[in-house]
Image (spheres, rainbow, N blue to C red):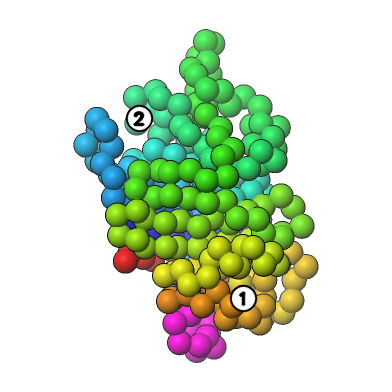
Amino acid sequence: MRLKFTGTGTSVGVPQIGCGCPTCVSADPRDRRRRCGAYVVTDAAHPYLGRKISFLIDTPPEMREACIEYGIDKVDAVVLTHSHMDHVAGFDDVRRFNTLNGGAPMRCYASAETVESMRRIFPYVGEHRNELGLYRPMIRFVSDDAFEIGSVKLRRLPVEHGFPCCGYLLEDSVQGFRVGYVSDCHDLPAQTVDALEGVDVMILNCLRERPHPTHLNLERSLAYLERIRPEKAYLIHMCHDLRHEDWLARLPAGIEPAYDGLEIAP
Ligand SMILES: [Zn+2]
Ligand SMILES: [Zn+2]
Ligand SMILES: [Zn+2]
């Protein structure tokens, strides 16, 4: 499997509207952080389209832009972490993938609480074409805690974010590559840390250096990474307090800030 970061920024994005700080005016493209999301291409071939099965993690506000920039035109499923707007505001654009997939409903994996909240935020979404011609996302919600998309097995992991939220463990059954993805939390329950222990790559939120009530700051992210002990770690959901170069200088070996467009593979 391959995972591309389509966004790595916090809820307001970087640059922030109306901010002139060094990060927000930086010329380094790695300092432009869309809201968090990822695109995963599995190693399993689609049964009749003859291409690799792939999925999106979250549908942030800039999902459409990211798909256009990175040439993402094949999506077979959507996996949601939670229904905060910075992770779901681009959900309406899933309808374009319904069209590209020949009108089939898209499977959307999310916890029961997130599904309930998605139905409230997007009440017009349905499983099939609307008879009056409304061009809407056609979605089949699935709330299983563990599921497979192509060659990747996913397991939903509880996290503490002051709001119903989860992370995921992705395991590629072909390559044995294991990736943890936790975009939003201020605490990880012991069972989640246990499930993530020793992953090849841990993708973990790290808002900034100062503490925050619902997000991990640098000190807490590093403390969790010490317990998870991944081969390699990437930080996401970063705000504008630090530039990419500042993060690189501050982080221990094996831990790096992710940036939009970065791709990871075994
Ligand atoms: Zn978020
Ligand atoms: Zn700024
Ligand atoms: Zn959130």
The answer to whether any part of residue 22 appears in the image is: no
Q: Which mark is residue 101?
A: 2
Disc 2 versus disc 1: distance between alpha carbons? 40 Å
Tell whether label 1 touches label 2 (CB within 8 Å): no
Name the residue: 48% across, 43% down.
Answer: 147
- Whether residue 244 is in magenta: the answer is yes
Name the residue: 42% across, 63% down.
Answer: 178
- Whether residue 247 is in magenta: the answer is yes
The quarter of the picture where the N terminus appears is bottom left
Q: Which mark is residue 162?
A: none
Using the image, determine if residue 215 lies above or below residue 84.
below
Give 198 or 242, whichever is nearer the viewer. Answer: 198
Q: Amino acid at mark 2?
A: Asn
| Horizontal side, residue 103 vs residue 226: left or right | left
User: What residue did someone put label 1 on?
Assistant: 224
Give 86 or 156, whichever is nearer the viewer. Answer: 156
Using the rendered view, name the quadrant where residue 222 is placed: bottom right
Name the residue: 53% across, 66% down.
Answer: 196
Percent coordinates x, y for residue 127 in the rendering: 52, 22
Percent coordinates x, y for residue 57 in the rendering: 49, 50
| Horizontal side, residue 195 vs residue 102: left or right | right
Of discs 2 and 1, which sits in the foreground?
Answer: 1
Q: Which residues are magenta?
A: 243-257
Name the residue: 52% across, 37% down.
Answer: 108
Q: Amino acid at mark 1?
A: Tyr
The quarter of the picture where the C terminus appears is bottom left
